[in-house]
């Protein structure tokens, strides 16, 4: 169906606000992970604004879409989008990682916030999503199940056990999105543990797989539509992103995987995102 120029512009505007929220939240918390969610902001915003049907009015509907954010450490962007969708108050974002707050450093399952699964322990996400997709199909629901994982998470064997199951059970209602930013906690993938061509790997497991520029809103939208039109097998979207995207001094820098910006760095980041 494509996207109108207005829809693309709305996504880009929201993604920019999400990026500002991410750096502000991690700065206020004095700890957290800014790099990953900055890189995923364009994909996540396209998903939340155009595809994932989570909204205040659908929050408690059993057959709404479901999302498992496997790389839970990137949740600052997830929370910013829950605020953008009117599910949590925008002011709540600055409680991120504070003692007693709902917005912890890794997502905690919460029906009132539409958070479908507690994550943070890497490697489980796709297995959980496979279970949800099978459950939805058994219930006769027509919803979609989205699993988001990272390239670092793809080093875990459990991801591939889940991939094998999803193809075996022909889970056409499942989309696995991989944030392929080539960076993990200890450095670049090529130096730590190269996962190589994830599209080929998913295809070898029997999936419909696509490589996508994770900063091209239209390409992301097209890939999600393509996944939605594939019924006989699960779909994988390998999202090629740049960690820290939008803040020049954080881009492609493994050091920004899990460090908070100081006051000066926050000001510089917000100036770039203005
Ligand atoms: C099972 C497990 N082992 C280790 C960790 C610690 N850990 C947190 S983030 C991370 C790096 C994961 O790589 P990736 O998600 O690709 O990093 P990013 O792209 O966000 O920098 C690790 C090892 C964890 N959360 N879970």
Image (tube, rainbow, N blue to C red):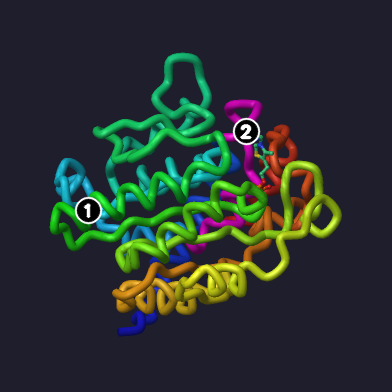
* Residue most extreme to the front: 168
Measured as percent of width and height from the top left, residue 100 is found at 43, 15
Residue at figure coordinates x 61%, y 74% from the top left: 200
| Classed neighbour count for the residue bearing mark 1: other residues with Cα under 10 Å, few (<14), some (14–19), many (≥20) | many
Measured as percent of width and height from the top left, residue 47 is found at 39, 62
Residue at figure coordinates x 42%, y 21% from the top left: 101
Determine the image quadrant of residue 179.
bottom right
Measured as percent of width and height from the top left, residue 235 is found at 42, 69
SS assignment for the magenta stretch, majority: helix
Q: Measured along the vertical axis of the image, is residue 270 above or below residue 109?
A: below
- Find out whether residue 268 is within the magenta segment: no
* Residue most extreme to the bottom: 1
Between discs 1 and 2, the one toward the N terminus: 2
Name the residue tied to disc 1.
Answer: 136
**Secondary structure found at label 1:** helix
Name the residue tied to disc 2.
Answer: 32
Residue at figure coordinates x 42%, y 66% from the top left: 167
The quarter in which the N terminus is drawn is bottom left
Magenta range is: 26-43
């Amino acid at each position: 169906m494509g996207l109108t120029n207005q829809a693309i512009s709305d996504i880009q505007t929201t993604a920019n606000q999400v990026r500002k929220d991410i750096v502000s939240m991690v700065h206020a918390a004095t700890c957290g992970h800014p790099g990953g969610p900055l890189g995923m902001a364009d994909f996540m915003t396209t998903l939340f604004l155009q595809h994932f049907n989570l909204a205040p009015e659908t929050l408690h509907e059993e057959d709404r879409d479901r999302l498992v954010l496997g790389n839970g450490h990137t949740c600052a962007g997830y929370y910013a989008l829950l605020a953008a969708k009117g599910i949590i108050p925008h002011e709540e974002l600055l409680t991120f990682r504070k003692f007693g707050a709902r917005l912890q450093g890794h997502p905690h399952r919460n029906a009132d916030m539409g958070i479908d699964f507690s994550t943070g322990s890497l490697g489980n996400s796709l297995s959980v999503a496979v279970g949800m997709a099978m459950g939805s199909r058994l219930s006769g629901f027509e919803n979609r199940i989205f699993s988001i994982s990272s390239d670092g998470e793809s080093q875990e064997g459990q991801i591939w056990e889940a991939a094998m199951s999803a193809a075996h059970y022909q889970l056409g209602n499942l989309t696995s999105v991989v944030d392929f930013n080539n960076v993990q906690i200890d450095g670049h993938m090529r130096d730590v543990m190269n996962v190589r061509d994830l599209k080929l790997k998913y295809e070898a497991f029997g999936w419909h797989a696509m490589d996508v520029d994770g900063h091209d809103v239209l390409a992301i939208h097209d890939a999600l539509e393509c996944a939605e039109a594939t019924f006989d097998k699960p779909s994988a979207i390998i999202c090629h992103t740049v960690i820290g995207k939008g803040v020049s001094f954080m881009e492609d820098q493994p050091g920004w995987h899990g460090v908070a910006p100081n006051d000066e760095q926050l000001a510089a980041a917000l100036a770039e995102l203005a």
